[in-house]
Image (cartoon, rainbow, N blue to C red):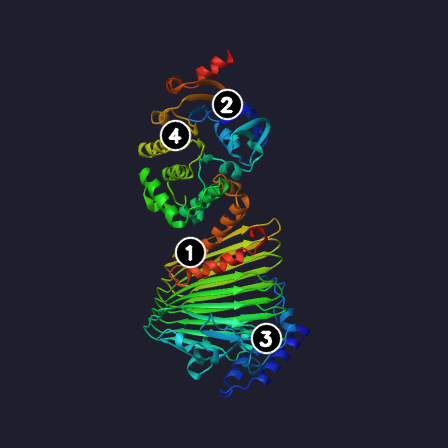
Amino acid sequence: MSLLEIKDLHATVDGNKILNGINLTVNRGEIHAIMGPNGSGKSTLAKVISGHPDYHVESGEVLYEINGKPSKILELEPSERAREGIFLGFQYPVEIPGVTNSTFLKEAFNSICKHQGAEELDAFDFNELIGQKCKGLNMDPSFIHRPVNEGFSGGEKKKNEILQMSILNPILSLLDETDSGLDIDALKIVAKGVNDLKSKYNATILVTHYQRLLDYIVPDFVHVLYQGKIIKTGGKELALELEKRGYDWVIGEKVQ
Amino acid sequence: MNGEMKIFLEKASGFNQINNDQDGGWSADFRDRALNNIKSSGIPSSKTEKYRHMDMSAFLASSVSSKDQQQNAVVSTADYHFNFVGGYFREDLTKKENLPSGLEYSLLGGSEVQDILAQFVDSTDFFQQMSNSFMDGGLLIKVKKNHTLDSPITIGNHDPKTNEALSLPRILVVMEEGASAELIEHYRGFKGVSWTQSLTEIYIEKRACLYHTSKNTGCPTGTQLNSTKVKVLGAGEYHNLSLFLGGKKSRNNLDVELLGEHAHCELVGLFSNDDSGICQNFTHIHHRVGDTTSVQYYKGLLDQKSLGVFNGTIFVHPKAQKIDSNQLNKNLLLSNLAHVETKPTLEIHADDVKCSHGATIGRLQEDEIFYLQSRGITKKRAVQILSEAFAIDAIYKFKGTQDREATVLYVKEFLETLPALKG
């Protein structure tokens, strides 16, 4: 059984049609990269899967494996999807003044543990877990005592997304342009976060503009999204070709 | 004379008769002067901006109790050093053994502070004039020269335990040169059609510093007013945290005068209400001389049909150059029917100053809520976390307090009662 199966998905935002029949199957253990020109619907796809309220599904289905069964997740609240192991790494992470990273993460972690029937961690054990994860990602542990994303640089915000991902240990990670605006060191941290998490049980979908991230994370599949549809699918070599030739040739191929 | 004024004067004269001062007529004169003032200027109309939403009916309906009536009321005083019952300072309930050293206190009105009290008199301030017309049995606190108190001074008020619901506690705090202290007041509104009106006057001498928290817990049927008037001399510092939580009507009047070079004040506030409660804040910062600085940060969190008002004015007086002042009011509406009126104001009469002000009113953003939801947190809980964070942020702006944990808890407990944030 596939972990995620998207069937003929159509979606709008503010009345504008963005997704025009997406079909995509993701199995456990796979890394998928979704590429495409600006405005092709890449971020929309990630937000629809995770349940952002601004995006409306017109038709189609998203099935996700819950307790060994394909389940229709479009009916679930975003928090319920997260508790079932779906994680969205934001393109623009939100600042939350007044809430520290550790408080926020502990709340999130324990709500997921509780749902999955695992034991919740107390403050002491949880801080130890965060400490380990920071160390693993070469991140300054003082990070966790700062209010969530407040006053963070663009790179720090993205690293914080990866830290959250590594602590929440999702089954399906959706990373929405997590690589944009990053210097090479931050990019390596993002890649390490994704590679450390990779196992035969979970899968990752990377939404990205550039091939650069794929130097550090090797995708099993590369999809080109254009006008809300996947118009070409290939292996990692497709990304290299896109880097050299741009998107026009794929679009041209499609038109013919 | 209109009907309201007639009742007011009857009440005041009744008060004069039941209180037997032992100060050779000084208190009686003090009250008379205030009363004459009110007679000539009248009870302000709720049609004027400054007194909008004001309603004197609870005051006029209440009756005055005497100090003697409040002497025997039994109250639990576990939480405070100094205790007011029915508006009167109960000296016998003072926790003398727990008072920090370097502090002196007495009943208000001795000859040595009469001059200071006279300096605070402001004939244009109706609420102060009201408190002055009912002046009796207040508390004087003095922190001795160059003393730093090692723990906060705490003051609370208690239910009059009689049917009378009128309560007018008053305090004068004198911070002598170089003294440093923290003061925490906690006023509660009483059940029924009550009127609780406190007045705290604070005199900060050179290089002295006071951290002052004013907690005001409203009651759903009462009116609660708190006036704080502060004078800060050269290089003195005044830090205030004003919390107005709940209640049918509450009003925060806070006036600070910076009177000497390098005087500084920081005013932080949080007001929150639900039902159809009204909470008003009127703050004035006077930069009377040059080289003075002020910071102001007020937050409002309004649920249901409640109304919040922030009316803050910074005056920079002529010749007061090199002023640095900034003022910000942020409001969060938790329901479609909640209202905020905000009016940050600058009145600048000098030319070499740096002043900024601003205000925001908004709701929680969908994107913020979704961010938390995407981490497994329910929408309800996300709204709770974000609202709480909005409020607690103000408390963290009040730096230097020893009481932060208790204050955070006090605010959280209130927020949990707001319908939008319940359970």
Q: Which chain is mark 3 on?
A: B
Q: Nearer the viewer, residue B100 or A212?
A: B100
Q: Are marks 1 and 4 in contact (CB under 8 Å)?
A: no
Q: Single out the mark in the foreground, 1 or 4.
A: 4
Q: Which chain is mark 4 on?
A: A
Q: Residue at x 39, y 24 (%)?
A: A219
Label 2, label 4: how many angstroms apart (C-alpha)?
20 Å
Label 4, label 3: how many angstroms apart (C-alpha)?
68 Å
- Residue picked out by circle 3: B161
Callout 1: SS: helix
* Residue B269 picture location, percent across and down: 48, 59
Whether discs 2 and 4 lie on one chain: the answer is yes
Callout 2: SS: strand
Report crowding for label 4: few under 14, some 14 to 19, many 20 or more residues within 10 A (C-alpha).
some
Q: Residue at x 49, y 49 (%)?
A: B385
- Residue picked out by circle 4: A198
Q: Single out the mark in the foreground, 3 or 1.
A: 3
- Residue picked out by circle 2: A24
Q: Are marks 2 and 3 in contact (CB under 8 Å)?
A: no
Q: Is residue B348 visible?
A: no
Sequence-wise first label, 3 or 1: 3
Q: Are marks 4 and 3 in contact (CB under 8 Å)?
A: no
Q: Residue at x 53, y 35 (%)?
A: A51
Report crowding for label 2: few under 14, some 14 to 19, many 20 or more residues within 10 A (C-alpha).
some
- Residue picked out by circle 1: B396
